[in-house]
Image (cartoon, rainbow, N blue to C red):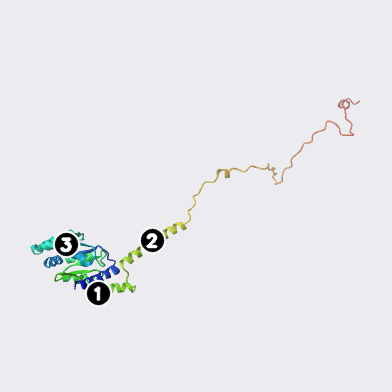
């Protein structure tokens, strides 16, 4: 009977590992009813739970569960002592505690993102847990711990994912990550595609120098015609070839 129970647990754990990404150490949320049943049937939770699940476990609870056990009095004092030895997970009801069943359901959220196991004998709680996909359920029958088979909701969720009707939280996370990377890549591409605007620079002072004049322009008349330069001929003091040279004295005396 023990070997058959181990095979059943191994098969169920494999289901949650491959379809809902459960990994060791398994986190197990316990309530007062489970600890009370373990105390009554003389079950050592800390020793038997890792053997049954064939892996490392982390046993934990919440402040709301401990507050509820305190309010119930001496009848559940032993269960309270057992729970106080385990880790306490923070819940959102620190200032205003709520019933244990309500608190544990809030820890699961809508898709059990933290991959919790629920260990409880509360039928109302177990019924609500089965409506959340991907939540392994533990309870005690006589003097043995039993891992319940996957709920119909979990099986339907896996089938919907396989047919492409749904996307797992891990796939959603990877998709959002890819979108972020693509958005960043697009922004970089846009920045690279944009040409830098050239700054308006002052003109080169050498290019602003006045051009040298190659020649002096000739002045123009009022009519627009160019003035002709007047050239004065020098008088020759001596005659040319074949011309006699006159004596200035002879001309004045009349001789």
Q: CA distance from mark 2 to mark 3?
A: 41 Å
The residue furthest right is 255
Label pair 1/3, CB-CB below 8 angstroms: no
Residue 199, position as x, y percentages in the image: 49, 50
Q: Which residue is mark 2?
A: 181
Residue 238, position as x, y percentages in the image: 85, 31
Q: Which residue is mark 3?
A: 64
Residue drawn at (17%, 66%), measured in percent from left and top?
101
User: Which structural element holds mark 3?
Assistant: helix
The residue furthest left is 74
Eye-nearest disc, 2 or 1: 1
Label pair 2/3, CB-CB below 8 angstroms: no
Q: CA distance from mark 2 to mark 1?
A: 37 Å
- Toward the viewer: 125 or 213? 125
Label pair 2/1, CB-CB below 8 angstroms: no
Residue 209, position as x, y percentages in the image: 59, 43
Q: Considering only vertical position in the picture, is 228 above or below 76?
A: above
User: Local crowd at mark 3 within 10 Å, few (<14), some, or many (≥20)?
Assistant: many
Q: Is residue 165 visible?
A: no
- Toward the viewer: 2 or 77? 2
Q: CA distance from mark 1 to mark 3?
A: 29 Å
Residue drawn at (33%, 73%), measured in percent from left and top?
162
- Quadrant of the image for the N terminus? bottom left
Q: Which residue is mark 1?
A: 152
User: Which structural element holds mark 1?
Assistant: helix
Q: Residue 89's image quarter?
A: bottom left
């Amino acid at each position: 009977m023990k070997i058959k129970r181990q095979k059943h647990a191994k098969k169920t754990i494999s289901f949650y590992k491959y379809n809902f990404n459960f990994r060791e150490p398994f986190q197990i949320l316990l309530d007062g009813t489970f600890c009370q049943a373990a105390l009554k049937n003389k079950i050592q939770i800390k020793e038997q739970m890792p053997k049954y699940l064939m892996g490392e476990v982390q046993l934990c609870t919440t402040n709301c569960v401990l507050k509820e056990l305190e309010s119930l009095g001496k009848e559940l004092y032993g269960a309270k002592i057992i729970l106080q030895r385990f880790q306490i997970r923070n819940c959102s009801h620190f200032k205003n505690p709520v019933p244990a069943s309500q608190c544990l359901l809030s820890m699961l959220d809508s898709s059990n993102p933290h991959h919790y196991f629920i260990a409880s004998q509360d039928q109302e709680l177990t019924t609500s847990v089965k409506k959340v996909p991907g939540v392994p359920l533990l309870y005690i029958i006589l003097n043995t711990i039993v891992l319940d088979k996957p709920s119909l909701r979990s099986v339907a969720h896996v089938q919907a994912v396989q047919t492409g009707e749904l996307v797992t939280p891990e796939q959603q996370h990877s998709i959002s990550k890819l979108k972020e990377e693509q958005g960043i890549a697009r922004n970089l591409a846009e920045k690279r595609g944009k040409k830098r605007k050239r700054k308006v620079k002052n003109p080169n002072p050498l290019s602003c120098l006045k051009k040298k004049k190659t020649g002096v322009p000739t002045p123009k008349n009022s009519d627009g015609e160019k003035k002709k330069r007047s050239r004065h001929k020098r008088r020759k003091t001596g005659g040319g070839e074949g011309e006699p040279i006159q004596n200035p004295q002879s001309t004045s005396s009349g001789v």
